Image (tube, rainbow, N blue to C red):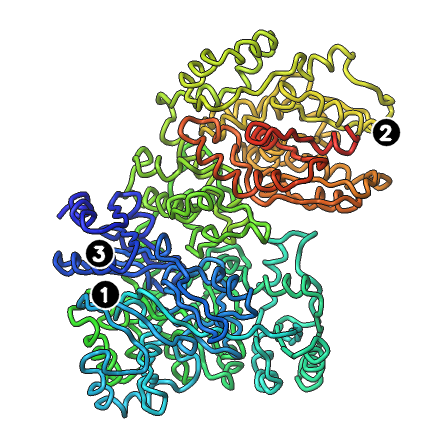
Amino acid sequence: MGTERLAAALGRGIAGEVDASARRRAEYSSDASNYRVLPAAVVFPRGAEDVAHTLEFARGNGLSVTARGAGTSVAGNAIGPGIVLDFSRYMNGIGELDPERRVARVQPGVVLAELQRKAGVHGLRFGPDPSTQNRCTLGGMIGNNACGPHAVAWGRTSDNVRELRIIDGTAAERTLAADPSAIPGLPEFTRAGLAVIRTELGRFDRQASGYGLEHLLPERGAAVAKSFVGTEGTCGLLLEATVDLVPLPRATVLTVLGYPDIATAADDVAAVMACDPIAVEGIDARLVDIVRVHRGATSGVPELPRGSGWLFVESAGETPAEAYAVAERLCRTVGALDSRIVTDPGVAAALWRIRAEGAGLAGRTPAGHPAWPGWEDAAVPPEHLGAYLRDFATLTMDHGVDGLLYGHVGDGCIHVRLDLPIADAPRRFRNFIQDATELVVRYGGSLSGEHGDGRARSELLSVMYSQDALDVFAGYKALFDPDDVLNPGVLVAPRPIDADMRLVGVRPIDGAGGFAFPHDNGDIAAAVHRCVGVGKCRADTRATGGFMCPSYLATVDEKDSTRGRARVLQEVVRGALPWSSEAVAESLDLCLSCKACRSDCPAGVDIATYKSEALYRRYRRRPRPIDHYTLGWLPRWLGAAGRLPRMANALAEVGWLRRIALRAGGIDPRREVPRLADRSFRRLWRDQSGGQGGSVRAPEVMLWIDTFTDAFDPEIAQAAVRLMESLGYRVRIPGRRVCCGLTWISTGQLDGARARLRATLTELDEHVRGGGLVVGLEPSCTAVLRSDLPELLPDDPRAAATAAAVRTLAEFLAEQPDWRPPPRPGQSVVVQPHCHHHAVLGFDEDRQMLASMQINVTEITGCCGLAGNFGMQSGHYDISVAVAENGLLPALRNAADDSILIADGFSCRTQAVQLSGRRGLHLAQFLLGE
């Protein structure tokens, strides 16, 4: 049955959605692992009936079924060749939260952070807390038996599950708790396998590989629900779970212990555990170094005690004094080189974020090579961890691989990603994994400590377990899924570890004259494979200052996530889809080119650049959509309209004429046309004889006059000139009307963009060679000069020099030793950072400047939704407004009437005034009190 017919036939029987398009299948072809398996279709069920019907349909048509939550599984647990069930879209409700009984009843698609938020109101939480908690789902956690830093106090997911409602592989609905008879034949099976289960399973807490059948033992309560946890979707499809909640500690304190290295830190774990911590995490110095680089100098890592390996130990108490006393006792009893007790919650949170960021940032080795999962989370009994780590370091050296270590030292579980030779030397990859398996088994350990075996380790279970144990695993699965419909190839009858690998068969892609991709050796194939699927783009990070990914936050659809788009482009670079395919167009359509992923994605995925490159490759020397000419050539049209601005404005105010013109130009007719200034800044500058003052002996600064400031808001440039002249500078502007090419870049017209950038370099060259600075006012244009310029003209030596000379206004002012911003005590402001300001330029100088002015600042997190040409294009208006509703519009509605909106971006100010009537000021205007 073809995919379209399959989708139509299946869709007739469910209330949810079925999608078998090439784009959707690409989006769900991988999770956070090294593996790629194209599904036949993806189903978004709305309830138990949809799940049951999908399973029955699959059984009747010889298809497999794989369950998926957020798709953050690192072992290939959430991909399959048949039907993938995405529970996160609709089956994400919390049916009950009982603070008296300390339980919650949840659907499988509930994001852990949402459960924690609602439980936190009652002083409760779900115990396990993996680093992906702001996007991982409870169903995925149950599938993989997730843990997290606090497992030493509150256990793994299996320790916190009371009851599960599932549909097994025969399409029968069952309720699992502590009654083995819920599964026909399970009591007899357990009695027959008691010897194997008692001797080979449950030997230490982090023995996560294989099935957790030790929970079936009578001395462990014959807990069928707990035995189901960690089965990775191979035994049933979860419909609902009843889970335990634990009280939040009344007071906590973080102690950071410094050691010579991570292995020595692991040697001290017994002394640490003797002080009853509620979390113990190990961090390697090289990971800290990478976090420092990623965060930047001004918002980097707080001071750590002496050492090259650290333990982060969280202690709890009934009062802050009691928790502090526990931390002091810890420092006295351990063998650390140095220690630091952290009581400031903000500093503690910044330190804990090192661990949370580890999964993504560890995707690059210190040398900058891509690092992959594959040997992600092995665990050994904690007393052997130090020795194991030393042998593991020797093993990696012998195999010529490198990576970054971090993990749950208190449990004996260590995470690492390595520059494994997956694509170019698969035999070397297999040899390393085989040797690593034998090493961990020699220490009595487990191939997986929390992420499951999936496709990455299931084949290797025969090294860890006897044939009798493997037979017991197969027998357990057969009771639930006798026909092997559920997630085949995982745990039982496994696929080879080197089958279905995403990188195999991918070759470097020759440049087409577009971007240089300097961080990926000029190869767009390597660039799009930066996405390893950690899924941070699916997280709602608005409360923590994230901007990624605005379209996903508006639609909650995988296709609009950074990861979903990267997956489609990965199919393109492997030759499975052409650049001109409808799948690519659909995937990139709602990308706002905000560049937030460039900074917020731990792997440095830059979909805005990939989108420009994709448009360039698709349309080069071919006819383009009309809006590429209207919006993409906007500076050209503004130059013409600027000769008669009053006539242009008058025509734009004729409603019917405006609507006809906008429709004809591929622009949404609901948009207003921004009003041109009566006189552009350049005309004002010329009329004032080239400047407002400044001694000829004064230092010069070049003010970059972008098209938008020039044509629409010349008063901003005038304010900037006055501000810089007040500091003793003589202000210059480019003598010719030059352009950064932003609108050409955003529409993929990269040849046109290069032509404009070359003209810009010629115009700025003398000033830059003389050591002068170039100050930009429009963040998007300034970001082009800082970032896109050297990536589009990598062979022009002027490009790097000019990029290094570019400053934002706040950066320029921060470099003036004698300047201080004027205080405005009590003034309330709402600040909308432009996305490119956040992602490329950095907003720290602006933030610090405003903080020093003694004003009340509300900083908006997230994109305004207009995003240059995006919100103007036909078909994007509704999503543009939806994005604005995630940050900008609520902030303006909640702001006091006398508050001031500061928005440096022309798009941000335009969106604000068009959707809320609130006019914004540029930072230059605000500093001058205008």
Q: Is residue 489 left or right of residue 325?
A: left
First along the sequence among labels 3 and 2:
3
- N-terminal label among 3 and 1: 3
Q: Quadrant of residue 77?
A: bottom left
Q: Can you give x and y, in whole percent of width and height, for residue 19 in the image?
A: 26, 46
Q: Quadrant of the C terminus?
A: top right
User: Tag on residue 878?
Assistant: none
Residue 26 screen position, x and y as percent: 31, 47
Question: Total number of numbered labels?
Answer: 3
How far from the left and from the top, in percent, is residue 103?
Answer: 44, 72
Give the residue number, with chain letter if any, for mark 2.
728
Side of 476 relative to 842 (left or right) = left
Q: Rounded to the nearest whole Å, what is the CA distance between mark 3 and mark 1?
A: 10 Å
Label 2, residues with CA under 10 Å away: few <14, some 14-19, many ≥20: some
> Do callouts 3 and 2 mark residues in contact (Cβ within 8 Å)?
no
Marker disc for residue 82: 3
Sequence order check: which comes first, mark 2 or mark 1? 1
Residue under label 1, please give it: 486
Inter-mark Cα distance, 3 to 2 = 69 Å
Q: Residues within 10 Å of mark 3 (few under 14, many from 20)?
A: many
Please identify the quarter of the rendering in which residue 740 is found.
top right
Amino acid type at image mark 3: Gly
> Closest to the observer: 615 or 859?
859
Q: Nearer the viewer, residue 918 or 781?
A: 918
